[in-house]
Image (spheres, grey):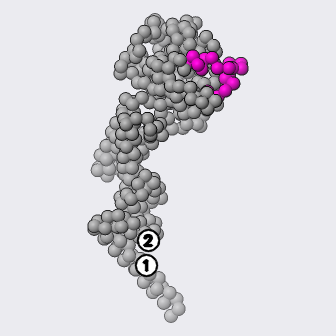
Amino acid sequence: MSHPSPKVRPSLAANPRVYLDVSIAGETAGRIILELFADVCPKTAENFRALCTGEKGIGPTTGKPLHFKGCPFHRIIRKFMIQGGDFSNQNGTGGESIYGEKFEDESFHYKHDQAGLLSMANAGPNTNGSQFFITTVPTPHLDNKHVIFGQVLKGMGVVKMLENVEVKDEKPIKKLLSCFKLMQDKIDKIIQIAEDLKTLGNNFFKSQNWTMADKKYTKALRYAATLRDEIDDEESTEKLESIKNLESILLSCNLNIAACKLKLSDWDAAIESCDEALEMNQSNTKALYRRAQAWQAKKDYDQALDDLKKAQDITPEDKAISNEILRVKQKKKEIKEKEKATYAKMFA
């Protein structure tokens, strides 16, 4: 049985919130803040939330990132709704959910009885993907056919602005781009998820399960990297603190992945992770030291010595680095003497 849609905003303080910044033909139009009804439609709300962050990677059906970034509103019908969410084809023919191409209708708990409701677009029963619409008037004919999973908290003026743009065959003449982002409370939760994954990685590393440690660090890295791309540096002091936390996670995960790759004898991957860490902090001695270890394993002693000398310049008091330099020099000397002896035999 369907119920009247919420009259309070937000309907539940614990529900996730996202916002989208909208532009019309390159001009900023404003911001729409949405509440997702995770209490009523957790699966549908999670689908939308994850599509806002892009954390699920590439979609197996579309071959495109599962991400609303740059996704347009492709269909406008005045006194009805505005529709978007086709991140692959951007015309209403594409998109997919984080669960696969389509997923089932989760709940028809709420009625389409007011403007500003966030509902799933579909092609019939149980065909939910990534496309959604926001109502601009009550639409009772959609009840028990489309899943309502959120509502506009702020920005109905922007919704109305989009509703009234010039269209041809329901398609906007000017491109209406949207950039979806998480509100700060969700940012904090994802940072915590990344931290928890990193801790799991540390535990696996301590137990010498290098493969599982690598997987956990890599997953934490993916969460942190995706979220870092979503945050505008200049937005607020709170956002700047989030960026600082994320960059710390990114750096430590890259270093830890490099350590795992060394244990797994994957020298090239270890070098790649160290390169990523050094892009973030070119003076990081751990990255230089671990990359030097990988170069040694590849028998590229010149590259190894170069990295170790850079590390020594940064921390000249570090005995481990000094000892490693001596070992590499000794190894180079042994190789040179061996080559010299080989040549002497050849021309004896």
Residue placed at 29% from the left, 50% from the top? 206
Count of marks placed on residues:
2
Relative horizontal placement of residue 312, taking residue 93 as reference (left or right): left
Q: Amino acid at mark 1?
A: Ile
Residue placed at 51% from the left, 17% from the top? 156
- The CA span between labels 1 and 2 is 10 Å
Residue 175 colored magenta?
Answer: yes
174 over 288 or under it: above or below = above
Q: Amino acid at mark 2?
A: Tyr
Can you tell which of label 1 and label 2 is closer to the viewer?
Answer: 2
Q: Disc 2 on helix, strand or loop?
A: helix
Answer yes or no: is residue 177 visible: no
Q: List the residue tagged with mark 1.
A: 335
Lower position in the chain sequence, tag 1 or tag 2: 2
Relative horizontal placement of residue 234, taking residue 206 as reference (left or right): right
**Which sits in the foreground, 40 or 156?**
156
Q: List the residue tagged with mark 2.
A: 301
- Judged from this view, the residue extending furthest toward the right is 168
Horizontal and vertical percent for residue 98?
51, 30
Residue placed at 48% from the left, 40% from the top? 229
Residue 190 marker: none
Q: Are marks 1 and 2 in contact (CB under 8 Å)?
A: yes
Q: Disc 1 on helix, strand or loop?
A: helix
Horizontal and vertical percent for residue 342?
48, 85
Mark 2 burial class by Cα count in 10 Å: few <14, some 14-19, many 20+: some
Q: In the rendered structure, which segment of residues is drawn in magenta?
A: 159-176
Residue 239 colored magenta?
Answer: no
Residue placed at 58% from the left, 19% from the top? 161
Answer yes or no: is residue 13 visible: yes
